[in-house]
Amino acid sequence: MHNFLFGIYPYIALSVLLIGSVVRYERDPFTWKSSSSQMLRRKQLIIGSILFHVGVLVIFVGHLVGLLTPIAIFDAIGISHGAKQLLAVIAGGIAGVMALVGGGMLMHRRWTDPRIRKTSSFADIAILALLLAQLVLGLGTVFVSLQHLDGHEMTKFMSWAQGIFTFRSGAAAQIEDVALIFKLHLFLGLTIFLVFPFTRLVHIASGIFAPLRYLFLRAGYQLVRSRRHRPLEERRRAYDKVQAKRGPSATTPAE
């Protein structure tokens, strides 16, 4: 089971993340967004959203750089394993608390306000609950990491992550003896990747790739798709008929 969860499941989750995101963008581009509810309880939304997004962004970049940067590079620039572990504990702990407080505010707002709850889908609430659970597990790993400030435990996760991305066999064996809370944290993180294309989380990719798309693929203009089914000329003729019945006092149509 360990080999499946940490040797095979990562490839399943990452494949669904990549392929599912591409398929959703091509087949249902109008769903590629995060629906706004900013008109309701705006102050709580702003504070919670800033704390949550800043915290999650710091955590994501920290995990990305910390896990996928080869150990030899840290050794070459003189950053010891212990110093890297301590930095991860401090920065990750602060960012985790920020994200958890902000996420808690967003969940409270979405769960307790009847109007917001009415416009929220099951996926909206479920993915936020998964993210909060992941943050709790992540903060729980901080207390375990404080017992391994030599950085030896962190090198196991770096070897595992780099082994997965370079398709090395036996990557799962690198973390076979780590604490259970780390394994739960990794498994839930992979599960979030798995459900990513089917939730509002896809808007994260827009923030990363949209500027590149308009700079290099569609330079000089923005593509706008209309939801209207009738051609413009047909709508104009229908409007002109209505105007003729009302008389000359009618206003100019808004196209």
Image (cartoon, helix red, strand yellow):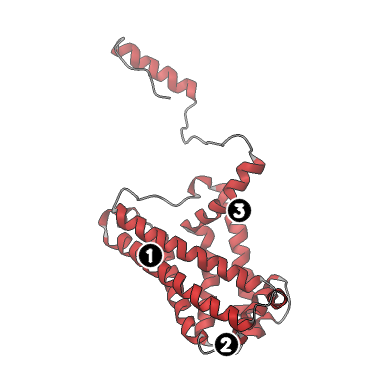
On residue 178, which mark appears? 2
The x and y percentages for residue 138 are 48, 76
Would you call the spot at circle 1 few (<14 residues within 10 Å), some (14-19), or many (20 or more)? many
Residue 136: give x, y in percent of width and height. Answer: 42, 76
Q: Residue at x 53, y 58 (%)?
A: 197
Residue type, label 3 = Val
Give the alpha-carbon distance from disc 2 to disc 3, as whole Å.
35 Å
Q: How would you rate the neighbour count of disc 2 (Cα within 10 Å): few for under 14, some for 14-19, many for 20 or more?
A: few
Check disc 3 and report the residue beneath it: 22
Which residue is situated farthest in the top direction here?
248
Say which label, 1 or 2, has the lower sequence index. 1
Seen at 57% across and 71% down, the residue is 63
Distance Cα–Cα, label 1 vs label 2: 30 Å
Q: Mark 1, mark 2: which one is toward the viewer?
A: 1
Q: How far separated are the C-alphas under marks 1 and 3?
A: 30 Å
Rendered view: 158 above or below 212: below
Residue 102: give its label. 1
| SS category of the residue bearing label 1 | helix
